[in-house]
Image (tube, rainbow, N blue to C red):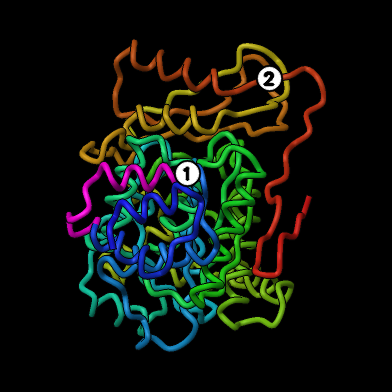
Amino acid sequence: MRTVDIIQKKRDGKPLTTQEIEALIQGYVSGEIPDYQMSAWAMAVYFNGMTAAETADLTLAMARSGDQADLSSIPGVKVDKHSTGGVGDTTTLILAPLAAAAGVPVAKMSGRGLGHTGGTIDKLEAIEGFKVELTKEQFLEQVKSIGVSVISQSGNITPADKKLYGLRDVTATVDSIPLIASSIMSKKIASGADAIVLDVKTGSGAFMKSLEDSIKLAQAMVEIGDQVGRETVAVITNMDEPLGLAIGNALEVREAIDTLRGEGPDDLTELCLVLGAHMLQLGGKAASYSEARSLAEELLRSGAALGKLRELIAAQGGNPEVADRVELLPSAAYQVPVQALEDGTVSHIDAEALGITAMMLGAGRATKEDHIDLAVGIVLSKKVGDRVSAGETLAELYMNRNEPMFTEDMTQRTRSVFTLSQGEVVKAPLIYAVVTKDGVQMLQ
């Protein structure tokens, strides 16, 4: 079949067959189909969309384009969790040990951070000695032994997605729900999980800014899961302000440990209990969501989830004492308070701008080649709805640079992300909806 015929068919709004999509992806990965033809196809998809069957076929074709993890030797229902990205999102460090403590195996491959969102692998590297790269055999044996492993994604996982994403980025075709959904789900399917829990962020600090678009994306991903035999649940969550208080690698590890101790921020704790309950229910450890929620709460309260984190750290070469002595994590040389200039109530925090400021401090990468300073970042003292007096601390900067101009710039940038109001502030909900194959359940 000719590539130009496939492009024309999609241009005219007609659905492509499984064979046509497979040929397109194989040809693109092998180099037989040039970028200019794939760009034309991506633009046709952008304008005409894809059916649920087409999107599932595209997802599977991309998943099969490279290495696929075979987790069949691990007993039980393997459950993966994925977040669409945000600021201060450290849920994996809490959810992986929590689920494993309940007997749900978690064989997780995670990525590094780029731009204003952090990466789980970077955070784990803040733990001295922690090995994020294991052989396939070591990875499988560790999950069989202790129920959990979190490693860096293989370089050959979904090469079609890597290549297509790079093309979409420079052809104004990123904002296509079928292409976004297949990109995310192809990696999850290639990673081998039986069931998937998705944390779909919405708001100023998220990729999807509107609730309507976030629900559409969640529905597309849940449909893909259903089409390819992976039970999938998506939770739509608020990213109009950072999750928790900490932004930055070692700072977020510390906050994750605090949460596993039962001492974490309310919003981070609540979200992890919600996502964790869905993981436990999909993993067959509870007959209902409420039963799974109670089990998740008990695993935090009893210390079982924190104990599983110690096991995970020790198994991958890190120092498990970190779970009891967070001062062993990298620490910044300077702490600079950012103070409010007036009285008021915090009505908005620009999560994306705050994430970019943390990146400028050294906590993230502007390009893949950038070096990360694991110790630096920002810790919030105030969240939306909190009262503030002039001179009171809004946030603290954790820095390893002491140049006055740089410090002043970072201070002003951080202060500017806070909007203070004089009237009453209504705080947005943390969780908006849950999407399953049975439909959308609005919670607010």
Establish if 230 lies above or below 45. Answer: below
- Label 2 environment density (alpha carbons within 10 Å; few <14, some 14–19, many ≥20): many
Q: Residue 21: x, y in percent?
A: 37, 63
Q: Residue 427: x, y in percent?
A: 74, 36
**Is 34 covered by the magenta stretch?**
yes
Q: Residue at x 67, y 74 (%)?
A: 292
53 and 437: which one is in front? 53
- Label 1 environment density (alpha carbons within 10 Å; few <14, some 14–19, many ≥20): some
Q: Quadrant of residue 235?
A: bottom right
Tell which tag, 2 or 1, sits nearer the viewer: 1
Establish if 136 lies above or below 321. Answer: below
The amino acid type of the residue labelled 2 equals Leu
Q: Residue at x 31, y 51 (%)?
A: 4
Q: Are marks 2 and 1 in contact (CB under 8 Å)?
A: no
Between the residue at mark 2 and the residue at mark 1, the CA separation in whole angstroms equals 39 Å
**Is 345 covered by the magenta stretch?**
no
Q: Earlier in the sequence, mark 2 or mark 1?
A: 1
Q: Secondary structure at mark 2?
A: strand
Q: Quadrant of residue 66?
A: bottom left
Establish if 51 lies above or below 232. Answer: above
Q: Residue furthest right?
A: 424
**Which SS does the magenta portion mostly show?**
helix
Q: Give residue 46's mark.
A: 1
- Which residue was labeled with disc 2? 420
162 and 33: which one is in front? 33
Q: Secondary structure at mark 1?
A: helix
Q: Give the magenta part as a residue range.
A: 28-45
Q: Quadrant of residue 335?
A: top left
